[in-house]
Amino acid sequence: MKRLPSNRTPIEVTVDGKAIRAFLGETVAEAMLTSGINTFVRSLKYHRKRGPFCLEGSCEGCLVRINNEPNVQSCMVAVKDGMTIETQNGYPNVTHDVVSLTDRVFHKGMNHHTLMTRPKLLNDVTSAVVRKLAGLGEPPTMANVTEIASRQIETAALVIGYGRAGKKILPLLGKDAIAIEQKKIDDAPHNVITEASVIAYYEEENVFVAAAAHEVITVKADRVIIAMGCYQEAPVWPGSDLPGVFGIRAIATLLDRNVIPGQSIALPKHEPNLARKLKIQDVEVYEYDYLDVLRCEALGDGLRLITTDGSFDCDVVVAPPLWSAASGIGRQLGCQVSLSRDGYVIRVDDSGKTSVHNVVAVGSVTGYPSEFFAWDDVLPAIASSEAPRAYLPVRAPRTLMINSPKAFACRCEDVSTKDVLQTINDGYPDIEEIKRYTGFGTGPCQGKNCLTSVASQITALTGKRCPPFTCRPPLTPTSLGHFAALEDHDE
Ligand code: FES
């Protein structure tokens, strides 16, 4: 990846002890990628190379240790001069990791339920080794624990998410309304709290909890508007987890920030705007049909995308537009959801109301394809909850997965499509059973990258409705310091 010249202030940070140049205003992930670092972390089970996919806080690929704090999403943290960054889970390092031999030895997959369970001596030795290797990152030392403050807010209306839908609706809700947004927004109005994630809703106290870098905020609101949009799920081809495979919005973000993602890029068809922007920068673009993809392979520093139509060697593969509604907080609130091609969308009536009193949902979290969204007509109606609107039917669930030991339905826990299909065939077609048996949905992304794929698979194979698994807090990786600050606050 290459930065275009800019007038930003250069600084220095270290990655695994080596100094690299970064620029104020960049995220840690951006600084690492533009310094030629693609592998940030090794995966949990097979120790496969992983790198950023989404660049918006919804996957597991960019976790690093920053200033001694493990498992930080580097795409959500701005670089600071002198910052110490370490890649994670590689022995001795993420570039050359001896434990990645597991990936080769178990090329047909690994069933950890029965592997080396007998005789007892072998089981004891294996268990000891696995316990040593399990987990991600080492705890921080006390000397480096960040102080987390806490505060309370009471508001007439809380908008969760300040993307397209949130921006439209917040001004309609009066001056007492506030919005909370995960991303950094330079010109956000004073009533928008940015770089803070709503991580939980606690029913007993009727409060939302949001975590920011140095504080935890509890919010009581009379009305709630969920405008969290959707995440892009990674596709489940063999090799789609390799560093260098990025989401569409990640590539658009990099271009907006004057970073050229590569000299040659494989892009899904029907993304004319992105294709045009890349071609303006002299990037060679190969447009592929994602239904034709067979697999993706590592090739030196780049990737090879293999389709039924031929193959293409490139620096970057842009993943197809598989969206998943960010309905987690709605599910914690008890809103009814429906499984669609775009994930579990929050069901709303003609005025945007959900099944929960005083909770409204707007934008793509409701399954509205944005191209049909008649914003200016619809949003005043939602705000007043009077005029009706046409509710668009959600699209059908997705198609079947490729059965492969190295196509990962859940990247966090290295759960392959073979593991999922085997579990269904073994007579456990319930999503909670599959979660418990395979561990899918239990990693740092909390199901954002796998829930829709697995649920769609279950629906396709069984023909039955598949409610989502229970969504529990926190919705995003959260430090124990935030929970401790919450406790102090209660006292
Ligand atoms: S790249 Fe940072 S969470 Fe996905």
Image: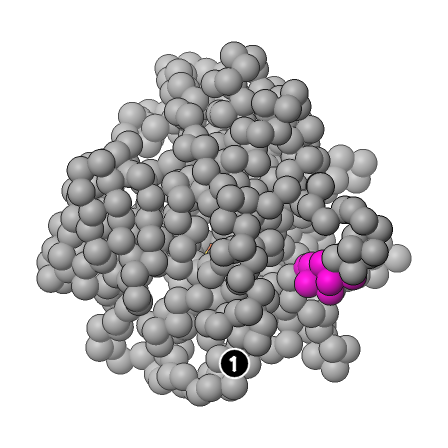
Q: Is residue 279 above or below residue 457?
A: below
Q: Which residues are magenta?
A: 128-135
Residue at the spot 35% in from the left edge and 76% down from the top edge: 35
SS of the residue under disc 1: loop
The reply to whether residue 468 is visible in this rendering is no
Relative to 149, 431 lies left or right: left
Can you give x and y, in whole percent of width and height, for residue 373 in the image?
Answer: 32, 28
- 136 and 76: which one is in front? 136
**Residue 208 as seen in the image, left or right of residue 236:** right
Query: Any atom of ligand 1 within 8 Å of the CB at mark 1?
Result: no
Q: Is residue 118 above or below residue 399?
A: below
The residue beneath circle 1 is 16
Q: Quadrant of the N terminus?
A: bottom left
Kind of residue indicated by mark 1: Asp
Say if the magenta span includes residue 129: yes
Residue 379 appears anywhere in the view: yes
Where does residue 217 sit, x and y in percent of width and height? 67, 55
Percent across and percent down for residue 16 are: 52, 81
- Front residue of this view, candidates 173 and 216: 216
Q: Quadrant of residue 379?
A: top left
In terms of secondary structure, what is the magenta stretch mainly?
helix
Q: Could you tell whether 439 is left or right of 377 in the image?
A: right
State which quadrant residue 99 falls in: bottom right
Q: Is residue 70 above or below residue 265?
A: below
Question: In the current view of this chain or complex, which residue is farthest to the top?
Answer: 463
The residue that appears at 65% across and 20% down in the rendered structure is 427
Camera-nearest residue between 309 and 163? 309
Looking at the rendered image, the quarter that the C terminus falls into is bottom right
Q: In percent of the image, x 30 and y 66: which residue is there?
A: 300
Residue 379 versus residue 258: which sits nearer the camera?
258
The furthest residue to the right: 491
